[in-house]
Image: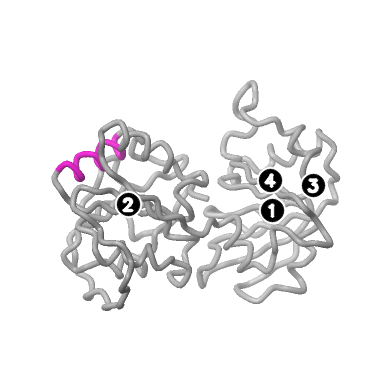
Amino acid sequence: MADEDGSKTHPKKQEIVRLERTDRPAPEISLHGLPEFLPGWVWLTGAGPGDPGLLTLHAVNALQQADCVVYDALVSEDILSLTRTEAELVYSGKRGGKPSLRQEDISRQLVSLAQEKKRVLRLKGGDPFVFGRGGEEAQVLVQAQIPFRLIPGISAGVGGLGYAGIPVTHREVNHAVTFVTGHLAGKDAPELLDWGAIAKATPVIVIYMGMSRLEAIADLLMEAGRDRGEKIAIVTQATMPEQRVVTGTLGSAAALAAKHNLQPPSIIVIGDVVDLHGELSWFGTAFEG
């Protein structure tokens, strides 16, 4: 779930940016028994969908030991405030449709910092291995013989929908779910995804990075047989105080997004589990299409 960002707190330059620390000291949290962050290592860490309370203890442990934090655009200031005052913060956000760092440059930066014997925390929104390019970065580290640790995070497609009161599976509704990235839907020929097979094979579809291609995605799914009246929900700013949940139908998906001026970061879910939102909604602001 990492595309266009309206945040004013992150620089937008096409270069890795180092920020001076001017924030308050990080709170001291006792984390006895968790691993020591050794110099020269890179920890690829998931920050979760946004709410700092969804960080794992391993992630907090990493934040409090790191010498350098290379963070993405979806990592909040509240999460960054948990780092040591002496830690260097390096912004490396990638945002679809906007000037962004090349992945190769980010990976090389991780290697370079580790070779300086720094304890390097690579901090990503959600989970590093779920549409987060963590696998690519890990491969570069292996090739450079840099030791690394993987700290999973709560993915927005699970945690974000949970905050919207939408379970991705329910015993009486569905026994399968498919997670896809939608940022290239309808742009390439042939399609990178077999939307026809996805439409037929799974009752619930969760789409990351799909807002800019929502109309194309809906058309592809309906062409493959999904009903125009099938329920859809769009969750923006998931788990954050600004969270909004808008529900409607697949046939009106693009109009729904335009009507409510929905912007990334957003998670889109299609399927009967959306019906549970009305009963289970407990957080944020909800609208019906």
* Dot 1 and dot 4 residues touching (CB under 8 Å): no
Q: Badge 3 is on which residue?
A: 251
| Label 1, label 4: how far apart the Cα atoms are | 10 Å
Residue drawn at 38 percent across, 54 percent down: 45
Magenta segment boundaries in residue numbering? 105-115
Q: Relative to 83, is 210 on the left or the right?
A: right
CA distance separating discs 4 and 3:
20 Å
What separation in Å lies between label 3 and label 1 (alpha carbons)? 14 Å
Per the image, label 1 sits on a secondary structure element best described as: strand
Res 183 visible: yes
The numbered dot on residue 43 is: 2
Q: Answer whether residue 254 is visible to the viewer in this image.
A: no
Secondary structure, magenta segment, majority class: helix
Label count reads 4
Instruction: Please tell me which residue is depicted at 73% across the width and 58% down the height of the picture.
Output: 169
Q: Which of marks 3 and 1 is nearer the N terminus?
A: 3
- The residue where tag 1 is placed is 269
Amino acid type assigned to the residue bearing label 4 in the image: Thr
- The answer to whether 263 appears left or right of 105 in the picture is right
Mark in the foreground, 2 or 3: 2
Which sits earlier in the primary sequence, circle 2 or circle 3? 2
Residue marked by disc 4: 178
